[in-house]
Image (spheres, rainbow, N blue to C red):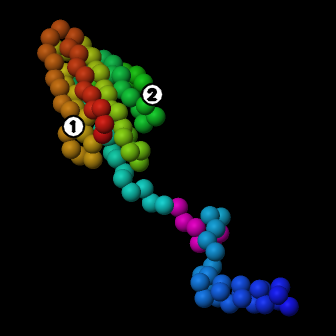
Amino acid sequence: VAVSLGGVAVVRLRGVFGSDEIFTATGSSAEPLEPSHLKKVTYEVDGPSDTTGSVSYVDNNAQPRRANFTRLPWTFTITTTVPAVIANVVAQGNSDSIACRITVNGVVKDEQSSAGHHAQTSCLVKAA
């Protein structure tokens, strides 16, 4: 009798307090979360259009990468949802001037230029 009354009480209480279906992460009602803070980090290197050279930068996994360019401008864009991004670019060309810029979501965060024989420049954003 006690077990039966306990079962009836649980069913009635669940009907009052637990009337919604139980949420499961694998159920059909589970949907992926939309990225809330999408960051678009763009590296830019500029100078005379016939400049050739190389650029080193940090990719979206914070790994160093290197690329060669045969003309300017050179650009590279990272799109990520991580809370903080370290952005760094170093460029050197065979011209007498070169410039770099790092933008985050369209806002310039660092911009540098250099002049001289085989000019070299670098830009750094510690927390984008």
Name which of mark 2 and mark 1 comes first in the sequence.
2
At 27% from the left and 42% from the top, the residue drawn is 104
Q: Nearer the viewer, residue 53 or 6?
A: 6
Task: Single out the residue that lies furthest toward the top.
Answer: 117
Q: Which residue type carries mark 2?
A: Gln
Say if residue 17 shows up in the picture. yes
- Assign the magenta stretch its main secondary structure: loop
Where residue 76 appears, x then y in whole percent? 34, 35
Note whether 118 is above or below 77 in the view shown: above
Q: Are marks 2 and 1 in contact (CB under 8 Å)?
A: no
Q: CA distance from mark 2 to mark 1?
A: 20 Å
Please name the residue that numbered disc 1 is placed on.
109
Please name the residue that numbered disc 2 is placed on.
63
Q: Secondary structure at mark 2?
A: loop
Where residue 103 appears, x then y in whole percent? 25, 39
Few, some or many residues within 10 Å of mark 2 (<14, 14–19, 20+): few
Q: Report the quarter where the C terminus lies.
A: top left
Residue 79 position by quadrant: top left
Q: Nearer the viewer, residue 63 or 3?
A: 3
Q: Secondary structure at mark 1?
A: strand
Few, some or many residues within 10 Å of mark 1 (<14, 14–19, 20+): some
Region of the chain picked out in magenta, as a range: 27-32
At 30% from the left and 32% from the top, the residue drawn is 126
